[in-house]
Every structure is written in structure tokens, then in C-alpha cells.
Amino acid sequence: MVKLRNTGSKAEGFRLRFGSYLDDFGTKVTLYHKTDVKDSMGRLTSSADTTSTIKADIQYVTKFDLMYLNSGEVEIGDGMLFIKYSININIHDEVEFNGVKWLVTKQIEGELVGGDLVYNGYFIRKND
């Protein structure tokens, strides 16, 4: 399991630089997060939708990327979303930017420095 120490780790400097990068060059993204509550039998009892605005780095998947990615679920035109390590996104959440909704399809292994997570990455696909 990845350790999420906040201070005193080697990753703290990288987290600060990544946060500064997002503040300067990141894209404002609207995150639509759905939370389901299930009972002890696994039946859905309620669900709640939340909306928040976050800063993210978005990169589009190219032919060159496909040569190095092992994931058969990624296609040209999909995107990669990179966010701060402390933000919680689940698979099948939606993000919206530039008037287009995207579905979070898979988590990418985040960058580790000294065993601590620096950022989270996700594959996203247009939600037509």
C-alpha cells in the first residue's frame, strides 16, 4: 500500500512543484462524483451525487503513447488526467472541461518518490 505522508517526506517537494504547475498551467475541470451506499446484503440503499471544480493536467493519447502502453482499453483520442494525490476520483466518475464530458475508465499508477505518492493519474474517454 502506498503511504500518504504529508510532511517530512522526499515526495513533499515534488508535490509542491506539481501543485504549482497545476496552478499555473492546469485546466479547470468539473468533477461529477457518485457515491453509492449499500446495505450488508450488497443492495443499493441510496446514492449521492457531488460536483466539485479541480485543477488537472490533461494530455491526449497519441500513436506514440500506444507503443508503450500495455492497456488494450486505451485508444487514440482518449486522454490522461493527472491530479493532486489528495483528490479522490473513482472509476466511472465523470469530468467535464471545454463543454465535453469524459468518463474515468482506469487508474494509472501514480508517481512514487521514496515510497510516497506524488500525483494520481487516470485514463479518460469521451462520454458520448
Image (cartoon, rainbow, N blue to C red):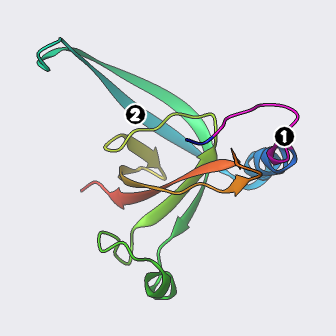
Res 93 → quadrant: top left
Under tag 1, what secondary structure? loop
- At x 49%, y 38%, the residue is 30
- Quarter that holds the N terminus: top right
Under tag 2, what secondary structure? strand
Q: Please report the bounds of the magenta region as a residue range.
A: 3-12
Res 92 → quadrant: top left
Picture disc at residue 32: 2
Residue 29 drawn at (x, y percent):
54, 43
Q: Nearer the viewer, residue 43 or 49?
A: 43
Amino acid type indicated by mark 1: Ser
Residue 3 drawn at (x, y percent):
65, 37
Residue 11 highlighted magenta (yes or no): yes
In the image, taking residue 31 as reference, residue 76 lies left or right, namely left
Q: Nearer the viewer, residue 23 or 89?
A: 89
Residue at image mark 1: 9
In the image, taking residue 12 as reference, residue 125 lies left or right, namely left
Q: Decide: marks 1, 2 in contact (CB < 8 A)?
A: no
Q: Residues within 10 Å of mark 2 (few under 14, many from 20)?
A: some
Q: Nearer the viewer, residue 79 or 16?
A: 16
Examine the rendered structure and indicate whether residue 75 appears above or below residue 117: below
Mark 1 vs 2, N-terminal side? 1
Q: Residues within 10 Å of mark 1 (few under 14, many from 20)?
A: some
Res 69 → quadrant: bottom left
Q: CA distance from mark 1 to mark 2?
A: 31 Å
Residue 31 drawn at (x, y percent):
46, 36
